[in-house]
Amino acid sequence: MTSETITVVEVLRRAQGYLAGRGVDTPRLDAELLLANVLDCDRLTLYTGFDRPLTTAETDAYRDAIARRGKREPVAYILGHRGFRTITLEVSADVLVPRPETELLVEWVLEVAPAGARVLDWGTGSGAIALALAAERADLTVTGIDRSAPALDVARRNDRDGIVEWLISDGFAALSGRVFDVIVANPPYIAEDAMVTLAPELGHEPREALVSGPSGLECYRAIAADAPEHLTDDGVIVVEIGATQASAVADLLSGAGLTDIEVRTDLAGHERAVGARR
């Protein structure tokens, strides 16, 4: 890509080829999303204005965005935001990019949370789960905790209406004596040696939010050990899991004295979440 006058259709063609050559899975979509962001328009407008020339400033800004994507930086970090259910979240390299699969956790909590329930989002990151729950169920009292102060800063900025309680906490440390009707968690669950086999985009996300330890189960062990004392009688816990972890996580929750163990799959048919009841 150069600084000569260039139209939307041509810049998209070049960007798509550039990204495809660097192994990006969705080069056309990503090229369109990034150009729409630079031009401050929606993707449909790109199609109705294919012959529109870009200014030098627009071309330079787009070239920078495409270069970042070519280095496999997630699109959401380049845009600075990501949609999650009914809300749009600020995201940065301090937090994981919210995934569509995690919406399953929100759906499960909405299903089981009684009226006026107290809900804890363990390891809240950007605040995606906590804010989605609070936005969709005004009767819920939602608390989000994270051990990362920079992540919690992002979550607080996303909470424009102040509808969630945010606490810095290493595990349940800041919650002594407190109980919740529902605990939901998307903890780190990747084993250390598995990172090298995964998509390069993950290398841009905070390692401490991805990697649990040698086995990938370390955070589940900690949650299983401490969660029961923070659940009300008949309280429910729901956790996101990696594709092969359902049996191991179910055993950890059962071993902690929790009952009614259930595994649910995501839209792709992968085992994605485990739930249990106190």
Image (cartoon, grey):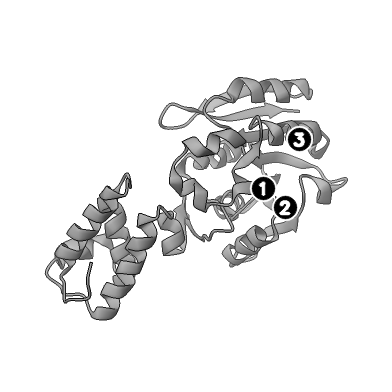
Is 58 left, or right, of 197 in this rendering? left
Q: CA distance from mark 3 to mark 1?
A: 12 Å
Q: Which mark is residue 222?
A: 3
At 57% from the left edge and 63% from the top edge, which residue is drawn? 158
Is 92 drawn above or below residue 177 in the view shown? below
Q: How many residues crowd mark 1 within 10 Å: few (<14), some (14–19), many (20+)?
A: many
Q: Do the CB atoms of the residues marked 2 and 3 lie less than 8 Å apart? A: no
The quarter of the rendered structure image containing the C terminus is top right
Task: Quickly name the residue at label 1.
Answer: 123
Query: What kind of element bears circle 3?
Result: helix
Q: Nearer the viewer, residue 5 or 172?
A: 5
Of mark 3 and mark 1, the one earlier in the sequence is: 1
Q: Is residue 163 visible?
A: no
At 42% from the left edge and 32% from the top edge, which residue is drawn? 267
Residue 200: give x, y in percent of width and height: 44, 46
Q: Is residue 89 visible?
A: yes
At 44% from the left edge and 55% from the top edge, which residue is drawn? 83
Q: Which mark is residue 9?
A: none
Q: Residue furthest left?
A: 51
Q: Which mark is residue 147?
A: 2
Residue 56: give x, y in percent of width and height: 25, 79
Is 24 drawn above or below residue 112 in the view shown? below
Q: CA distance from mark 1 to mark 2?
A: 7 Å
Q: How many residues crowd mark 2 within 10 Å: few (<14), some (14–19), many (20+)?
A: many
Query: What kind of element bears circle 1?
Result: loop
Amino acid at the residue labelled 2: Arg
Corner quadrant of residue 15: bottom left
Is 116 drawn above or below residue 252 in the view shown? below
The quarter of the rendered structure image containing the N terminus is bottom left
